[in-house]
Image (cartoon, grey):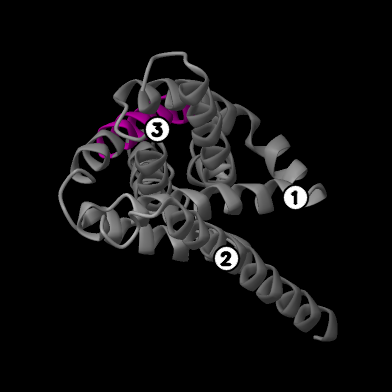
Amino acid sequence: MELFSMEWLVALLGIILIDLVLAGDNAIVIGMAARNVPKEQQKKVILWGTVGAIVIRAVATLAVVWLLQVPGLRLFGGLLLVWIAYKLLAEDKKHDITAKDNLWAAIRTIIIADAAMGIDNVLAVGAAAHGSFSLVIIGLLVSVPIMVWGSTLILGWMTRFPIIVFAGAGVLAFTAAKMITDEPMLHTWFAAPALKWLFVAVVLAGVLLLGRRKQKAASLADAEA
């Protein structure tokens, strides 16, 4: 994939959207972890906790880009990503972060929490990068500052405009379907372009329709409670 080509730019936009919808609540996690630290140390906690989280996420994502070249792992990753796309629509994110009262404990909490919560993000970005390490790095450099310092605003947008989450789930479902159809072990199954794109359309429609249905059922149950 040529650097700064239209295909590269479209993939970069997809990575940024994935980052925003999957990790838009990072600021909340950071804030919860740092809230018991003395006020004069909170900026340090946020800064170094974020730096540590970014480094671990970048290394993990680059590892995923490499691992997805191993036969069979694109199929496994694609199926896992289908489930992640569905969960994005069907489930509410929960935050259960224990606040720490000293600098290094709070930083460690942020890094561990981000690593645990960022598995879906790492897999999705690794798949959307299509083997391009430059996409992973530039995508992180663009989206991480937005996630950390603009998360509250992003969360407000996603609450006010659910179409953002819907679009993010669509990008994930599309990426998952393409991962499966690009699996070398299934090459003969999807040799015909029509069959390949029919499968992609079915996965995309299935995730969005089932996720939306679950979302509506959950909203109705909450209203009746």
**Label 3: element kind:** helix
Position in image of residue 42 (x %, y %): 51, 29
Q: Is residue 194 above or below residue 45?
A: below
Q: Amino acid at mark 3?
A: Gly
Question: Which numbered disc flags the more N-terminal residue, 2 or 1?
Answer: 1
Q: What's under tag 2, amino acid-wise?
A: Val
Q: Of circles 3 and 1, which is in front?
A: 1
Count of marks, rendered view: 3
Please name which of the two marks, 2 or 1, marks the residue nearer to the observer: 2
| Residue 46 painted magenta | yes
Coordinates of residue 122 in the picture (x, y in percent): 36, 44
Secondary structure of the residue carrying tag 2 is: helix
Q: Which residue is mark 1?
A: 163
Closer to the camera, 123 or 94? 123
Give the mark nearest the N terminus, 3 or 1. Answer: 3
Identified at 45% across, 66% down, the residue is 83
Residue furthest to the left in view is 70
From the viewer's perspective, is 208 left or right of 8?
right
